[in-house]
Amino acid sequence: MADNYLENQYENYWARKAAMGKKTIKKKNIIKVQRLQSEAIEALKDIIEQPSFQMPFDIFREHLYSAESLYKGYQLGKPGSFKDCYDQQVYQHYLDMGKASTDIKETLARTLHDHSMTNAMNDFLAHFDERQVVGIMGGHGLLRTDEAYRQVVMVSKTLAENGCLMISGGGPGAMEATHLGAWMAGRTEAETEDALTMLKEAPSFKDRLWLETALQVMKKYPQEQYVSLGIPTWLYGHEPATPFATHIAKYFDNSIREDSIVTIAMGGIVYTPGSAGTMQEIFQEAVQNHYLSFGISSPMIFLGKDYWTNEIPVWPLLQDLVARGKYKNLRLTLTDDQEEVVDVITEFRSSTEPLVP
């Protein structure tokens, strides 16, 4: 028995010693990793502070862009100065270095910039309830002279006046109409019609006076009460960011930008006529709602019955998928009536029912 006791004590001694050794090794490894991380951070700071690392864009930006900061360098009354503004200087640099640059400094700088954008956007969104945030998606080719453009403006204007934060991809077309509506919130219908008339001088974003006419509207009708959020990308830098968005989160990485748009618009998304990009956003949102990826199923409203039923038959496809149980938890609306769009969004926002249908 004594022998067994001594043997047990001996085994326990070596077991404890081995365990202590493992803890010591683990602690040493943790300290080593922490030291390496610290060294990496310091090395990164040293690299970024080098003159050779300077970029034509803000690597660490604390705040979102505005029309003033994005178009800094543009001179009102001189459309030719567009190429000299901050936005276009960054875009030209982006093209010169390659959209998919293999330069490590360039890649790192873009990543840090986009990370800063996301942080700034999250800080901005923290001031809003998730059901307040409403998106409008649609084609960049929609002309300012199209009736559908005016319809989007009026829908967005009403929703903004009802307390919604309007967001879009931040470009021209339906996206611009979204932010024009929010910009004109609080003003009369006559003033809004006047703004639309002023913009008709340059119907397309390809027109030389596209930015000039927008800035003239902003000068005539300043906005100090209502805000909106545009989320454009330099990947599509040939499509200028609308200056009507009071807050702009512009990204290099389009995938982060697209995911952000459908993720944060938990108050619902209105789909106006569009092409490939809009199709992607529709099914990306449908998947999020189906899986309740963020614990919420938000309204998906298709504005334009003929377009979404016949020209691009997304509506019958979604209806069929829902009927066969392939998609669940979708809140779908098809309409031509802008008042119905407002009613669906307003009802969802004010509802006390669970966020899952």
Image (cartoon, rainbow, N blue to C red):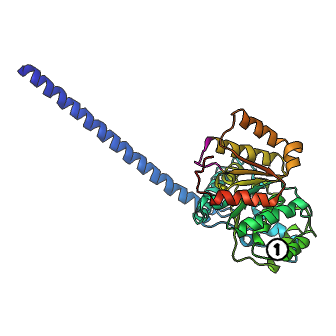
Does the magenta portion include 300? no
Does the magenta portion include 296? yes
- The quadrant in which the N terminus is found is top left
Which sits in the foreground, 324 or 179? 324
Which sits in the foreground, 163 or 149? 163
Residue 239 appears at what percent x and percent y? Answer: 82, 58
Q: Is residue 333 above or below residue 16?
A: below
Residue 285 appears at what percent x and percent y? Answer: 69, 46
Which sits in the foreground, 187 or 340? 340
Q: Is residue 93 visible?
A: no
Q: Helix or strand or loop: what does disc 1 sit on?
A: helix
Neighbours of disc 1 within 10 Å: few (<14), some (14-19), many (20+)? many
Query: Residue visible at 60% across and 50% down?
Result: 355
Q: Is residue 2 visible?
A: yes
Query: Residue visible at 79% across and 57% down?
Result: 237
Q: Which residues are magenta?
A: 291-297
Give the amino acid at mark 1.
Leu
Query: Residue visible at 70% across and 58% down?
Result: 345
Which sits in the foreground, 262 or 313? 313
Query: Residue visible at 89% across and 64% down?
Result: 144
Left or right, residue 231 beside residue 142: left
Q: How many marks?
A: 1
Left or right, residue 209 beside residue 1: right
Identity of the residue furthest to the bottom in this view: 220
